[in-house]
Amino acid sequence: MTKEKDTSINLRNLIFQTILSIVIVLVIVFGLAFFFRKELLGFSEHFVRIFGYWGLFFGMILSDSLPAFVPPDAFLMLAISGEMNPLLTILSMSFGSILGGSLAYFIGLYLIPKFHLGRQMVLHYEDKLLPYLRKYGFGAVVLSALTPIPYSWMAYTVGTFKMRYSLFLFGSLFRFVRVTVYFYAMYLGWITGG
């Protein structure tokens, strides 16, 4: 009985954190659109002209394979302020995110166990991520794909613990949902802020 209660409390907290992060992103984009619209339009125009959808794709690969590179939401902001096609943006960013997560998975599977520093990094995040893996197994990947649980760190962790890649990949498909929801939340902030 206690385990079920703990599980539902964690899920409620994750749902609350996810909704809160979407609202915060919407408010931040509204503020950026209201106060810095001209600057963002100029910067995003250069980004779109130079990098386009390939820039979003490769940016997401780096973002989700190298933690703390650039937050994925920065690329969404550039796409929205650069008036890029929503469907192509969502597809290029989602595929890039899944490929980046897959790279992190294979780094966790093959490289991290061989290096002391890699093991230390995983151990640092293990305390936060292992409870999700123990409680939800494959569902932990789905949760990290959808919620504020760091997706790239989950990819490293499940790779290190040798989860089947097919399970990891299936759970990673939920990145499409996350990118879509955040895209439209940010788009709403952008159009209402301007």
Image: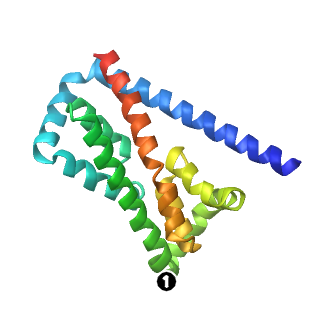
Percent x, y for residue 139?
62, 54
The residue at 51%/52% (across/down) is: 150
Q: Is residue 107 above or below residue 88?
A: below
Quadrant into which the C terminus falls: top left
The 10 Å Cα crowd at callout 1, few under 14, some 14 to 19, many 20 or more, is few
Lateral position of residue 20 relative to residue 50, left or right? right
The residue at 82%/44% (across/down) is: 5
Q: Residue furthest bottom?
A: 114
Q: Is residue 135 above or below residue 86?
A: below
Q: Is residue 111 above or below residue 141?
A: below
Q: Nearer the viewer, residue 103 or 46?
A: 103
Q: Nearer the viewer, residue 159 or 70?
A: 159
Residue at the spot of label 1: 114
Colour treatment of the image: rainbow
Q: Residue furthest right?
A: 1
**Residue 69 seen in the current view:** no
**Residue 46 seen in the current view:** yes
Q: Is residue 158 above or below residue 30?
A: below
Percent x, y for residue 104?
43, 66
Question: Which amino acid, by three-letter code, is at mark 1?
Answer: Lys
The residue at 79%/46% (across/down) is: 6
Quarter of the figure with residue 161: bottom right
Percent x, y for residue 18?
55, 37
Percent x, y for residue 128?
64, 56
Q: Secondary structure at mark 1?
A: helix
Q: How many marks?
A: 1
